[in-house]
Amino acid sequence: MEYLLLGATIGVMVGMGAGFFFKREDIRRRSLELEAENERKIRQAEQEVHKKEKEAQEIINQAKEKSHDIMSDAKDKAHKLQQDVEKELTRLEEKEGVLKSKTEDLEKTLKSLDVKQDKLDEMEKELNETISEEKGKLENISKMSESDAKEHLLSLVERTFEKDIIEKMRRSEEGLKETLEDRARNAIVQSIQKIASEVTSESTITAVSIPNDEMKGRIIGREGRNINAFERITGTDVIVDDTPGVITISGYDLLRRFIAKKSLEKLIEDGRIHPARIEEIVLKTTEKVDKMVKDFGEQAVFEVGVSGLPSELIKILGRLRFRTSYGQNVLKHSIEVALLSEAIANEVGADAELAKKAGLLHDIGKAVSQEVGGKHALISGDICRKFKLGEKLINAIEAHHEDREMICPEAFIVAAADAISASRPGARRETVNAFIKRMKDLEEIASSFGGVDKCFAIQAGREIRVIVDPEKVTDLEAKKISWDIARKIESDMSFPGEIKILVLRETRNEDIAR
């Protein structure tokens, strides 16, 4: 039994020793393999490092070459720039020398001129003294001043040749009237008979009906936010007073008032009134009105029979539907002037098509006169010049208020047609106060001249009847007074059409038979 145990022990020990030996060998073998693998990776890493170092060196060399080239190029450019600067400095120094020389010459010339001016002043002074002395001697001899002598001479000439002057003036006027009046009257009358135009009266306020007075509070809004937003967006004033069932929109611009009215009606119908909704409605209404404006322009062009106008120009023309002049709708007035111009041109043998087109567009500047400063006739010409409509047509437009010299017959025709349309009875209206003031101003102007006894503004201010004192005013002076009154009215007042000045001088001789 002991031998068995001993044998088993020895066997176990031998097995353990063999296992340990084999395990150690396996570990040593693996260790050698790992060492070999590490050496291989190290060699591979060294090769990679060597390769990267080589590539880096090549990049460094290339960078050095490029930097050398850049430096060389920069030096060349700097050298060239320095040469250019030196040349420019040399040129400027030469110019400076020339300018300095010219300045010196100019100073010498100025000094010479100063000397000559002093001599001229001295000579002028001596001459004035001599003239004064001679004038004084003449006044002493004649016992009259210069102004008295001038007035006496003119008075002597007027008295001596008064009849001849008046007769010559009368013959000249009669000759002109005989050749022009009949033809002009016939042309104008026949032209007016060919057209008819309604007159639309516009005001500066527009009334909007509301279903009940509760709506006024909703339109005003909390702390006035709704009405303030509406006024700010539309550019109009909203008047909410005690008048039942009505809200008033006020503004000088018809187009803005129209947009404001349509927008307010839509808001009242919709019932939702707040700043955001107001802005939305006004924007939509403005878009619709823009389309309407173009339609108005197209209708006017169709009614007159003008073709070939650009669409943008037609749209600007349509804006005149929302402009008035003394209560007369400007678009209706433009249509009337176009038809009158065409008719007159046909009567006198001018270019009817050009006159008609110029008549239609003559006031188109009023559509933008609020945005562009200046006279509307010149603005109209600039607009048409932008669309290249021709210089004759542009002259006819710009000259209809004599802001330009008339260079073609059509310009005279358009000016005449404009005056006819503006001055016919009922075409334009004024307030009572403005009318009374205009009558008063006309009478004051006429009364301001010496020798005037009485004066009356009649026919709604289209005629002034002036009665002069026959003891103080001669026939020739009466003629001169009428001319002077006409010129003063033209310079001091603005008015449509024309004003007739009639000066009456009547001599009455009275005696008694007993």
Image: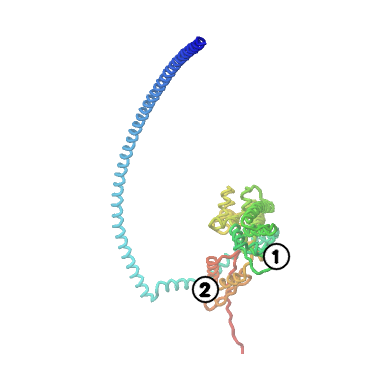
Residue at 67% x, 69% y is 243
In this image, 351 relative to 75: left or right? right
Q: Callout 2, which amino acid?
A: Phe
Residue 157: percent from the left, percent from the top?
48, 71
Residue 401: percent from the left, percent from the top?
57, 59
Q: Which residue is mark 1?
A: 212
Above or below, 124 relative to 38: below
Colouring used for the render: rainbow
| Secondary element at image label 1 | loop
Residue 509: percent from the left, percent from the top?
58, 81
Residue at 60% x, 87% y is 512
Residue reaching furthest to the front? 1
Q: Which residue is mark 2?
A: 449
Q: Callout 1, which amino acid?
A: Asn
| Secondary element at image label 2 | loop
Q: Is residue 423 visible from the viewing direction of this image?
A: no
Q: Nearer the viewer, residue 180 or 123?
A: 123
In this image, 182 relative to 99: left or right? right
